[in-house]
Image (cartoon, grey):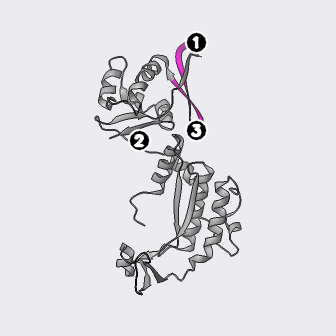
Protein backbone atom coordinates (compact mmCIF):
# COMPACT_ATOMS: atom_id res chain seq x y z
CA UNK A 1 0.00 0.00 0.00
CA UNK A 2 3.12 2.21 0.06
CA UNK A 3 2.35 3.65 3.49
CA UNK A 4 6.01 4.32 4.23
CA UNK A 5 6.17 1.93 7.21
CA UNK A 6 6.84 -1.77 7.62
CA UNK A 7 5.02 -4.39 9.69
CA UNK A 8 8.11 -4.55 11.91
CA UNK A 9 7.88 -0.82 12.64
CA UNK A 10 4.15 -1.05 13.34
CA UNK A 11 4.73 -3.88 15.82
CA UNK A 12 7.42 -1.97 17.69
CA UNK A 13 5.56 1.34 17.78
CA UNK A 14 2.31 -0.22 19.00
CA UNK A 15 4.26 -2.19 21.63
CA UNK A 16 5.88 1.02 22.83
CA UNK A 17 2.53 2.83 23.06
CA UNK A 18 1.02 -0.06 25.00
CA UNK A 19 3.97 -0.27 27.39
CA UNK A 20 3.53 3.36 28.47
CA UNK A 21 -0.23 2.96 28.96
CA UNK A 22 -1.56 4.28 25.63
CA UNK A 23 -4.18 1.92 24.22
CA UNK A 24 -3.92 1.17 20.50
CA UNK A 25 -6.88 0.83 18.13
CA UNK A 26 -5.96 -0.68 14.77
CA UNK A 27 -7.54 0.41 11.49
CA UNK A 28 -7.41 -2.75 9.39
CA UNK A 29 -8.14 -2.98 5.68
CA UNK A 30 -8.91 -5.88 3.35
CA UNK A 31 -9.91 -6.09 -0.28
CA UNK A 32 -7.16 -3.74 -1.44
CA UNK A 33 -6.71 -3.92 -5.25
CA UNK A 34 -4.25 -6.70 -6.20
CA UNK A 35 -4.60 -8.31 -2.73
CA UNK A 36 -4.68 -12.08 -2.99
CA UNK A 37 -6.48 -14.58 -0.76
CA UNK A 38 -3.10 -15.65 0.61
CA UNK A 39 -2.30 -12.06 1.58
CA UNK A 40 -5.66 -11.71 3.32
CA UNK A 41 -5.02 -14.81 5.44
CA UNK A 42 -1.46 -13.70 6.16
CA UNK A 43 -2.77 -10.31 7.30
CA UNK A 44 -5.19 -12.05 9.66
CA UNK A 45 -2.32 -14.11 11.11
CA UNK A 46 -0.25 -10.99 11.80
CA UNK A 47 -3.25 -9.33 13.46
CA UNK A 48 -3.77 -12.49 15.56
CA UNK A 49 -0.17 -12.36 16.76
CA UNK A 50 -0.38 -8.64 17.59
CA UNK A 51 -3.42 -9.27 19.79
CA UNK A 52 -1.98 -12.41 21.36
CA UNK A 53 1.17 -10.54 22.39
CA UNK A 54 -0.97 -7.74 23.80
CA UNK A 55 0.56 -4.89 21.78
CA UNK A 56 -2.79 -3.77 20.33
CA UNK A 57 -6.09 -3.70 22.20
CA UNK A 58 -8.85 -3.12 19.64
CA UNK A 59 -9.43 -2.88 15.92
CA UNK A 60 -11.90 -2.96 13.06
CA UNK A 61 -11.72 -4.49 9.60
CA UNK A 62 -12.71 -2.04 6.85
CA UNK A 63 -13.23 -3.22 3.28
CA UNK A 64 -11.33 -1.10 0.76
CA UNK A 65 -13.40 1.63 -0.89
CA UNK A 66 -12.28 3.40 -4.05
CA UNK A 67 -12.63 7.17 -4.26
CA UNK A 68 -12.25 9.09 -7.47
CA UNK A 69 -9.56 11.55 -6.39
CA UNK A 70 -7.31 9.06 -4.58
CA UNK A 71 -4.03 7.89 -6.22
CA UNK A 72 -5.73 4.59 -7.11
CA UNK A 73 -8.78 6.39 -8.49
CA UNK A 74 -6.53 8.54 -10.64
CA UNK A 75 -4.41 5.59 -11.87
CA UNK A 76 -6.69 2.51 -11.76
CA UNK A 77 -4.75 0.74 -14.50
CA UNK A 78 -1.73 0.47 -12.17
CA UNK A 79 -3.82 -1.58 -9.73
CA UNK A 80 -5.64 -3.85 -12.14
CA UNK A 81 -9.10 -2.40 -11.55
CA UNK A 82 -11.79 -1.02 -13.84
CA UNK A 83 -13.80 1.80 -12.19
CA UNK A 84 -17.51 2.06 -12.91
CA UNK A 85 -17.69 5.83 -13.05
CA UNK A 86 -21.13 7.30 -12.42
CA UNK A 87 -22.22 10.76 -11.40
CA UNK A 88 -20.60 11.59 -8.08
CA UNK A 89 -22.53 13.76 -5.64
CA UNK A 90 -21.38 15.53 -2.50
CA UNK A 91 -20.37 13.12 0.32
CA UNK A 92 -21.22 10.15 -1.91
CA UNK A 93 -17.99 9.64 -3.80
CA UNK A 94 -17.32 5.90 -3.46
CA UNK A 95 -16.66 4.36 -6.87
CA UNK A 96 -17.64 0.78 -7.68
CA UNK A 97 -14.99 -1.19 -9.56
CA UNK A 98 -14.09 -4.57 -10.99
CA UNK A 99 -10.95 -6.21 -9.65
CA UNK A 100 -8.77 -8.11 -12.14
CA UNK A 101 -8.03 -10.78 -9.49
CA UNK A 102 -11.67 -11.88 -9.66
CA UNK A 103 -11.74 -12.32 -5.86
CA UNK A 104 -14.98 -11.60 -4.05
CA UNK A 105 -13.55 -9.91 -0.96
CA UNK A 106 -17.02 -9.62 0.57
CA UNK A 107 -16.90 -13.31 1.43
CA UNK A 108 -14.12 -12.65 3.96
CA UNK A 109 -16.03 -9.97 5.86
CA UNK A 110 -17.80 -12.18 8.41
CA UNK A 111 -14.80 -14.38 9.21
CA UNK A 112 -12.42 -11.43 9.62
CA UNK A 113 -14.79 -9.58 11.92
CA UNK A 114 -15.72 -12.67 13.94
CA UNK A 115 -12.09 -13.57 14.55
CA UNK A 116 -11.26 -10.00 15.51
CA UNK A 117 -14.12 -9.86 18.02
CA UNK A 118 -12.72 -12.98 19.69
CA UNK A 119 -9.12 -11.71 19.66
CA UNK A 120 -10.20 -8.47 21.35
CA UNK A 121 -11.65 -10.60 24.16
CA UNK A 122 -8.54 -12.77 24.47
CA UNK A 123 -10.17 -15.77 22.79
CA UNK A 124 -9.47 -18.03 19.83
CA UNK A 125 -5.73 -17.55 19.50
CA UNK A 126 -5.13 -21.31 19.24
CA UNK A 127 -7.78 -21.96 16.59
CA UNK A 128 -6.67 -22.59 13.00
CA UNK A 129 -7.42 -19.53 10.86
CA UNK A 130 -9.56 -21.71 8.60
CA UNK A 131 -12.06 -22.15 11.47
CA UNK A 132 -13.19 -18.55 11.09
CA UNK A 133 -14.45 -19.11 7.54
CA UNK A 134 -17.12 -21.38 6.10
CA UNK A 135 -15.12 -21.96 2.93
CA UNK A 136 -11.65 -23.29 2.22
CA UNK A 137 -8.75 -20.88 2.71
CA UNK A 138 -4.98 -21.47 2.38
CA UNK A 139 -2.70 -21.91 5.37
CA UNK A 140 -0.85 -18.79 6.42
CA UNK A 141 2.70 -18.38 5.20
CA UNK A 142 3.58 -16.17 8.19
CA UNK A 143 5.80 -17.80 10.81
CA UNK A 144 4.02 -18.27 14.18
CA UNK A 145 6.70 -16.20 15.94
CA UNK A 146 6.97 -13.47 13.28
CA UNK A 147 5.72 -10.53 15.39
CA UNK A 148 7.62 -11.74 18.46
CA UNK A 149 10.83 -11.76 16.42
CA UNK A 150 10.07 -8.24 15.15
CA UNK A 151 9.92 -7.07 18.75
CA UNK A 152 13.02 -8.94 19.87
CA UNK A 153 15.23 -7.93 16.95
CA UNK A 154 14.76 -4.18 17.19
CA UNK A 155 17.79 -2.53 15.55
CA UNK A 156 19.99 -0.31 17.68
CA UNK A 157 19.58 3.34 16.76
CA UNK A 158 22.36 5.76 17.61
CA UNK A 159 21.01 9.13 18.67
CA UNK A 160 21.99 12.67 17.81
CA UNK A 161 23.93 14.55 20.45
CA UNK A 162 21.14 17.16 20.53
CA UNK A 163 18.38 14.58 21.13
CA UNK A 164 16.57 14.81 24.48
CA UNK A 165 15.51 11.68 26.42
CA UNK A 166 12.06 11.73 28.03
CA UNK A 167 10.98 9.55 30.96
CA UNK A 168 7.29 8.65 30.68
CA UNK A 169 7.31 5.99 33.39
CA UNK A 170 6.35 6.46 37.01
CA UNK A 171 8.63 6.74 40.01
CA UNK A 172 10.53 3.44 40.34
CA UNK A 173 11.02 1.40 43.46
CA UNK A 174 14.68 0.62 44.12
CA UNK A 175 16.94 -1.13 46.60
CA UNK A 176 20.57 -2.23 46.79
CA UNK A 177 21.94 -5.72 47.21
CA UNK A 178 25.20 -7.63 46.91
CA UNK A 179 26.01 -10.04 44.10
CA UNK A 180 28.73 -12.61 44.60
CA UNK A 181 30.47 -14.89 42.12
CA UNK A 182 33.70 -16.88 42.42
CA UNK A 183 34.70 -15.10 45.59
CA UNK A 184 34.10 -11.60 44.23
CA UNK A 185 31.30 -9.33 45.44
CA UNK A 186 29.63 -6.38 43.70
CA UNK A 187 27.08 -3.90 44.95
CA UNK A 188 24.05 -3.74 42.66
CA UNK A 189 20.87 -1.69 42.46
CA UNK A 190 17.50 -3.27 41.68
CA UNK A 191 14.94 -0.97 40.06
CA UNK A 192 11.29 -2.00 39.69
CA UNK A 193 8.95 -0.08 37.37
CA UNK A 194 5.22 -0.74 37.27
CA UNK A 195 3.52 -0.21 33.89
CA UNK A 196 -0.14 -0.59 32.96
CA UNK A 197 0.48 -4.15 31.83
CA UNK A 198 3.63 -5.38 33.54
CA UNK A 199 6.17 -5.10 36.34
CA UNK A 200 9.70 -4.68 34.98
CA UNK A 201 12.86 -5.36 36.99
CA UNK A 202 16.14 -3.73 35.95
CA UNK A 203 19.54 -4.32 37.53
CA UNK A 204 22.39 -1.77 37.47
CA UNK A 205 25.78 -1.58 39.10
CA UNK A 206 25.00 0.41 42.24
CA UNK A 207 26.78 3.67 41.44
CA UNK A 208 25.53 3.79 37.84
CA UNK A 209 22.01 3.01 39.02
CA UNK A 210 22.14 5.80 41.58
CA UNK A 211 23.38 8.18 38.88
CA UNK A 212 20.47 7.29 36.62
CA UNK A 213 17.89 7.68 39.41
CA UNK A 214 19.25 11.19 40.04
CA UNK A 215 18.62 12.01 36.37
CA UNK A 216 15.00 10.84 36.25
CA UNK A 217 13.42 14.04 37.58
CA UNK A 218 15.26 16.03 34.92
CA UNK A 219 14.03 13.66 32.20
CA UNK A 220 10.30 13.88 33.00
CA UNK A 221 8.13 15.29 30.24
CA UNK A 222 6.93 18.22 32.36
CA UNK A 223 10.53 19.41 32.88
CA UNK A 224 11.28 22.39 30.66
CA UNK A 225 15.07 22.07 30.65
CA UNK A 226 15.61 18.38 29.92
CA UNK A 227 19.29 17.58 29.21
CA UNK A 228 20.47 16.48 25.79
CA UNK A 229 22.23 13.20 25.13
CA UNK A 230 25.47 15.18 24.88
CA UNK A 231 24.91 16.71 28.34
CA UNK A 232 24.09 13.32 29.87
CA UNK A 233 27.18 11.81 28.27
CA UNK A 234 29.40 14.58 29.63
CA UNK A 235 28.00 14.22 33.15
CA UNK A 236 28.16 10.41 33.08
CA UNK A 237 31.77 10.34 31.92
CA UNK A 238 32.90 12.60 34.75
CA UNK A 239 32.11 9.62 37.03
CA UNK A 240 32.33 6.49 34.82
CA UNK A 241 33.69 5.20 31.52
CA UNK A 242 31.94 5.03 28.14
CA UNK A 243 28.40 6.45 28.20
CA UNK A 244 27.45 4.50 25.05
CA UNK A 245 28.08 1.15 26.75
CA UNK A 246 25.80 2.24 29.58
CA UNK A 247 23.07 3.71 27.35
CA UNK A 248 22.85 0.59 25.18
CA UNK A 249 23.23 -1.90 28.04
CA UNK A 250 20.57 -4.54 28.65
CA UNK A 251 19.30 -2.58 31.65
CA UNK A 252 18.69 0.57 29.59
CA UNK A 253 17.13 -1.43 26.75
CA UNK A 254 14.64 -2.83 29.27
CA UNK A 255 13.84 0.72 30.38
CA UNK A 256 12.98 1.58 26.79
CA UNK A 257 10.17 -0.96 27.17
CA UNK A 258 8.62 0.89 30.09
CA UNK A 259 8.89 4.57 29.54
CA UNK A 260 12.09 6.11 28.17
CA UNK A 261 11.97 7.61 24.70
CA UNK A 262 14.20 10.05 22.85
CA UNK A 263 12.96 13.11 20.98
CA UNK A 264 15.14 14.42 18.19
Q: CA distance from mark 1 to mark 2?
A: 35 Å
Foreground mark, 1 or 3, reads: 3
Residue 183 falls inside the magenta stretch = yes
Can you say which quadrant of the picture contains the N terminus?
Answer: bottom left
Can you say which quadrant of the picture contains the C terminus?
Answer: top left
- Upstream in the sequence, badge 1 or badge 2? 2
Q: Is residue 157 above or below residue 81?
A: above
Q: Residues within 10 Å of mark 3 (few under 14, many from 20)?
A: few
Foreground mark, 1 or 2, reads: 2
Check the image and name the residue furthest to the front: 90
Task: Report the magenta residues as a range.
Answer: 182-203
Which circle marks residue 156 in the picture? 2
Residue 116 falls inside the magenta stretch = no
Tag 2–tag 3 contact (CB < 8 Å): no
Q: Which residue is located at x 47 percent, y 48 percent?
A: 13
**Residue on which disc 1 sits:** 183
Amino acid sequence: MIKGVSVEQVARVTRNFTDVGIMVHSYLMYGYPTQTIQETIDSLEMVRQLFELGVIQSGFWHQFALTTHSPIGQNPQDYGIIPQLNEITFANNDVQFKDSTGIDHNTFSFGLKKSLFNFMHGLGFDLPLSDWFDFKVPRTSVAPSYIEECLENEPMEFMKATAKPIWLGGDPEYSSFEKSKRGETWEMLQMIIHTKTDCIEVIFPLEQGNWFIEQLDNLKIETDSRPTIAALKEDFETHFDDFELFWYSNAMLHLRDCGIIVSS
